[in-house]
Image: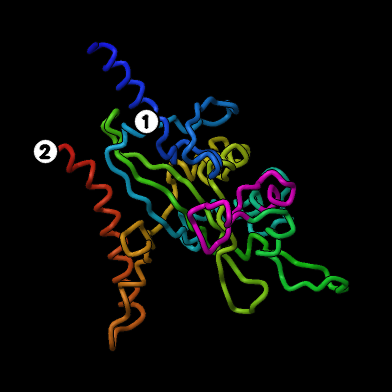
Amino acid sequence: MRLIVSIVLLVFFSVEINSQSNLLNAKNPSEIGVSSSIESINPSFLEYPEIDEKDILWSKVVYEYIDLNEKLNFPLLFPVNDEQYTDTRKSLWKVIRENIENGNIKEVFDVRNDNFLEKNRITGTEKIKDFYGSKYTPGDSRPQTFASSADISAYRIKGVWYFDKLHSELKYRLLGIQPYGRNLKEAGMEQGYFWIWYPSIREILAEHQVFNDKNNNNRISFDDLLVNRRFSSFIYKYDNVYGDREITDYIVKRPGESNQQHQLRIILESERIKKEILDFELDMWGY
C-alpha cells in the first residue's frame, strides 16, 4: 500500500514540476509554461542548457541600458555606415534589421510592454518597419527612409539572474533585447523601437561575428558577446511589487539639485542593485 501511495505522489509531483513556467527554456514566448526538451540544432553556438525549475533557488529579473557611446560597447555600434561593408562586418542593428525585413525575425513585441504577451505581438514586416521608419504617405514621391546604424544610440535588455542550486552557482539568462534610437517621425526625439524575444534570434546572431580590434583572427559572434555579458550597462529597472517601476520613478530630482547630481544618484542606485544581486552568491556560502 505504501509503495502505491509513493508512486502516486511521485507521478503527481512530476506533473507539477513539468507544469512550471518554463521561462528559462522558452525559445518563443508561446513556449512559456510548456515543458520542452532542448536539443542543439545549430552546432555553431552553445544552446542554453535546460533548467529544471526545482533547481532554481532564487531569481530576479532586471532591465539594463547598454549605452553605445561607451567604448566597451563600440563592437555593437560600428560600422555605422551600413553601405561600407557587405557580409564581412555588420553592426548589431544591421543584422537585426536585415533579418526583420527578410522575415527571419518574427518574435517582435510592442515596446510599451516587455512581458512578451501574445496580445502585444507585432505581426507583419511592414508593421515592424514602421516603428523605425519615417513618416510616409501612400503615393508620396519621396522614398521612405528607415533608421540606420548611425541612428541607434543604445540597447535595452531584459534578463534574469538566478541561483542554480544544482551547481551552486549564480547564472544569467538574456531574455529580451530592444533597439533604442532616433525617432524618424519626430525631430530631436529618441525612443525604443520594439522588444525582441532573444532566444529566438540566437542562431541568427551566432552567424555574425564582432570585430576584434586587438586580433582580427580571434573574433566572437554577437550571441557570444551578449550571452557572456561582454558589454557595459546599468540597471534602470527590476521586477518589484510596485508594478516594475523604474529607478527614475523613485530617485527623483531634489530641489536645487543639478542634473549631474541627480544622474549620479541614479547610477549609485543601479550599482547598489547590481551589488545586491552579485553578493547573493557570496552570502550563500556564508551560512
Q: CA distance from mark 1 to mark 2?
A: 28 Å
User: Disc 2 marks which amino acid?
Assistant: Tyr
Residue 113 painted magenta:
yes
- Assign the C terminus to one quadrant of the image: top left
Q: Position of residue 159 (x, y in %)?
A: 42, 49
- What segment is highlighted magenta in the picture? 97-121
Asked whether, in this view, residue 72 is left or right of residue 179, the answer is: left
In this view, the residue in front, 72 or 107, is 107
| Residue type marked 1 | Ile
Q: Residues within 10 Å of mark 2 (few under 14, many from 20)?
A: few
Hey, which residue is sitting farthest bottom in the picture?
256
Report the residue that reaches farthest toward the front.
1
Give left or right: position of 277 versus 78: left
- Label 1: which residue? 17
Residue 287 - label: 2
Disc 1 packing (10 Å; few <14; some 14–19; many ≥20):
some
Residue 56 sits above or below residue 132 on the image: above
Looking at the image, is mark 1 or mark 2 earlier in the sequence?
1
* Color style of the picture: rainbow
Percent of width and height locating residue 267: 32, 66
